[in-house]
Image (cartoon, rainbow, N blue to C red):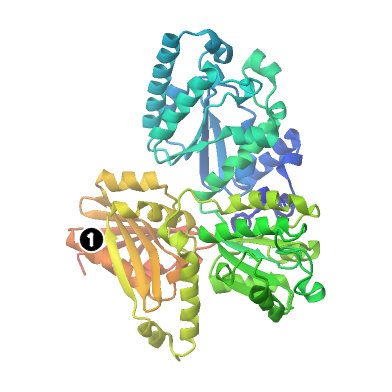
């Protein structure tokens, strides 16, 4: 199944056409003709028309109009109602002010077109002319950085000379201009900007297929449709991550997935899993990629039809097996259907099905999972096993996060703590007795700049206990904090088993004697412990001490947060208005 085509629960919730839903799961972007993309993008747009608009603006000094439908199609396929807009041709600096309110801005600044024909004119320019040009461009870059400083996400392509200078043995003045500007950008890049190493895309597609010089010289349309397909897929993990769409759990089959062979038939020494033999080298490379994901906080699990004792023996006896048992959080090693095992993992981990990526060599097992758990993204081990490491590398982009937090790096440890808690729960007859035994401790921080990264991440990842499901970048939360009219509460939780980490967030807008709860959320790892009641009560008391008379709040319904539909009512708020998708509340503090 194509990495591009993982479809999420939300599509079903918005009454997405189920026939199209099934069709989309089989599409591979690179195999689609441009006319097919245009047609399917139109259908997707109609299906998502009732969802909030997500605006992506492209600023460029070359023609990039063919990116429009391709990028919309890629992002809409993930249940995000993307609308791509284009600034005026070759007007990046001025347009950076005009389009700053977009959800995403993409800057396609082509070095060769900074002045017409720079790729060849630079070769005969004097050092004074080059220095003056560099100063001018740096000033323009500074203006763009400033104008887009409040945009949630800015995707900025690095300058490149590769298209024009690929045949030169020695660097020339065009390269020198490029290197100095790229160094300046890297040294001064705002936190809401993300640099795209565009040379990597040329490597994927090839320069020959990335560009068409006929159209560049006639109309400044440099890049091909094939390049724009690659570009749209390359940047999509960035956009998905800030919309809470990153994957969290990697589930792997074992036989012919983690090693070559079948342990139950070939025996302990008959399987190939390392560089000790020619068939194992591909699998060892994948093992290292898996370990790296685990290190970054991805939860790695096994799901295999096997005897568990056979697998245990591999870790005991095969010292050349790169993966350790510490890298694996959970194992479903039995003979029941894999979709059932995956469903149990989903429940055990308390995550959505769309958080999982499942890897197996069997087309039968892949089909069963796709039929019974369509939200799970699947990857089949390729028949040409030497392509397996490359395909797996591509898969890792599904787990992309813009930044790493302490919670990410400790996630596996936290899940092990949770497993111990579940075993502890079995000892108690009542939930209250169990919760009392945990010795829960809450630490609530107000307006601490140290927690911006994790606060942003919580908004992007939390779906179940999230009253409004608003997504914020780190820059946006920083702006709220520095604006002086918001209070940002971050909650840390721990118990006798260990830390849960930063697991609660509330963003409150203050307007004289009134306050509005913009965001109230808890990570799924602390649900079922009544922590939310203590958190909201702390906030209410804090606001009352500030002289707030009324607190306003709302619940915005999604496919995943219906369990908290009555949260405010249960905590004393009065309903002001209600519809199928939204309920407005008010709490008067004068009577408390």
Left or right of 298? Residue 437 is: left
**What is the crowding at mark 1: few (fewer than 14 residues within 10 Å), some, or many (at least 20)?**
many
Left or right of 467? Residue 345 is: right
Q: Residue furthest front?
A: 276
Task: Evaluate whether residue 365 shows in this view.
Answer: yes
Q: Quadrant of the C terminus?
A: bottom left
In front: 487, or 145?
A: 145
Q: Is residue 147 above or below residue 215?
A: below
Task: Evaluate whether residue 88 shows in this view.
Answer: no
Identify the residue shown where x is 41% and y is 59%. 406
Left or right of 405? Residue 40 is: right
In front: 318, or 502?
A: 318
Please tell me how many numbered marks the rendered image carries: 1
Q: Is residue 216 above or below residue 228?
A: above
Identify the residue shown where x is 57% and y is 15%. 119
Q: Is residue 94 above or below residue 186?
A: above
Q: Quadrant of residue 515?
A: bottom left
Name the spot of residue 206 as percent of width and height, x first: 70, 31
Q: Which residue is mark 1?
A: 543
Q: Is residue 124 above or below residue 313?
A: above
Name the spot of residue 467 as percent of width and height, x first: 42, 60
Left or right of 116? Residue 456 is: left
In front: 324, or 446?
A: 324
Name the spot of residue 341 as percent of width and height, x first: 67, 73
Identify the residue shown where x is 67% and y is 75%. 317
Name the spot of residue 171 as percent of width and height, x first: 56, 21
Q: Quadrant of residue 315?
A: bottom right
Q: Secondary structure at mark 1?
A: helix
In front: 303, or 518?
A: 303
């Amino acid at each position: 199944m194509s990495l591009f085509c993982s479809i999420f629960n939300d599509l079903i919730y918005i009454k997405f056409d189920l026939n199209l839903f099934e069709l989309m799961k089989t599409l591979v972007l690179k195999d689609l003709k441009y006319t097919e993309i245009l047609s399917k993008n139109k259908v997707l747009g109609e299906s998502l028309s009732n969802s909030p608009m997500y605006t992506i603006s492209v600023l460029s000094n070359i023609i990039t109009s063919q990116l429009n439908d391709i990028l919309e199609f890629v992002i809409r396929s993930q249940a995000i109602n993307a609308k791509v807009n284009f600034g005026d041709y070759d007007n990046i600096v001025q347009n950076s002010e005009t389009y700053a309110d977009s959800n995403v801005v993409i800057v396609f600044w082509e070095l060769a077109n900074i002045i017409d024909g720079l790729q060849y004119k630079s070769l005969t320019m004097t050092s004074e002319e080059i220095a003056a040009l560099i100063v001018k461009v740096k000033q323009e870059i500074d203006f763009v950085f400033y104008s887009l400083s409040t945009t949630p996400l800015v995707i900025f392509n690095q300058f490149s000379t590769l298209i024009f200078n690929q045949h030169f043995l020695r660097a020339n003045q065009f390269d020198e201009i490029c290197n100095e500007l790229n160094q300046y950008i890297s040294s001064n890049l705002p936190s809401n900007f993300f640099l795209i190493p565009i040379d990597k895309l040329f490597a994927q597609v090839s320069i020959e297929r990335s560009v068409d010089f006929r159209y560049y010289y006639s109309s400044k349309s440099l890049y091909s449709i094939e390049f724009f397909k690659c570009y749209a897929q390359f940047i999509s993990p960035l956009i998905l991550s800030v919309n809470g769409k990153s994957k969290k759990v990697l589930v792997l089959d074992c036989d012919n997935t983690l090693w070559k062979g079948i342990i139950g038939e070939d025996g302990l020494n008959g399987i190939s899993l390392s560089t000790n033999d020619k068939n194992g080298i591909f699998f060892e490379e994948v093992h290292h990629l898996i370990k790296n994901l685990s290190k970054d906080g991805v939860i790695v699990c096994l799901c295999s039809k096997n005897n568990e004792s056979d697998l245990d023996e591999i870790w005991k006896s095969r010292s050349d097996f790169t993966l350790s048992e510490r890298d694996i959080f959970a194992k479903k090693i039995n003979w029941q259907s894999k979709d059932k095992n995956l469903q149990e993992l989903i429940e055990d981990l308390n995550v959505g099905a769309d958080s999982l990526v499942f890897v197996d060599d069997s087309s039968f097992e892949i089909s069963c999972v796709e039929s019974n758990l369509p939200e799970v993204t699947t990857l089949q081990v390729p028949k040409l096993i030497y392509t397996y490491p490359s395909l797996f590398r591509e898969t890792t982009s599904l787990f992309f996060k813009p930044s790493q937090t302490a919670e990410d790096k400790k996630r596996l440890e936290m899940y092990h703590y949770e497993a111990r808690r579940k075993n502890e729960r079995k000892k108690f007859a009542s939930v209250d007795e169990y919760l009392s035994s945990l010795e829960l401790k809450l630490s609530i921080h107000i307006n601490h700049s140290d927690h911006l990264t994790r606060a942003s991440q919580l908004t992007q990842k939390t779906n179940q206990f999230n009253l409004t499901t608003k997504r914020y970048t780190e820059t946006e939360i920083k702006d709220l904090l520095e604006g002086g009219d918001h209070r940002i509460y971050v909650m840390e939780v721990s118990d006798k088993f260990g830390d849960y980490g930063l697991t609660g967030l509330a963003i409150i807008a203050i307007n004289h004697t009134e306050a509005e709860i913009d965001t109230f959320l808890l990570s799924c790892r602390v649900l079922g412990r009544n922590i939310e009641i203590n958190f909201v009560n702390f906030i209410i008391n804090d606001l009352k001490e500030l002289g707030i008379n009324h607190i306003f709040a709302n619940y915005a319904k999604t496919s995943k947060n219906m369990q908290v539909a009555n949260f405010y009512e249960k905590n004393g708020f009065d309903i002001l208005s209600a519809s199928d998708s939204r309920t407005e509340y008010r709490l008067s503090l004068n009577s408390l």
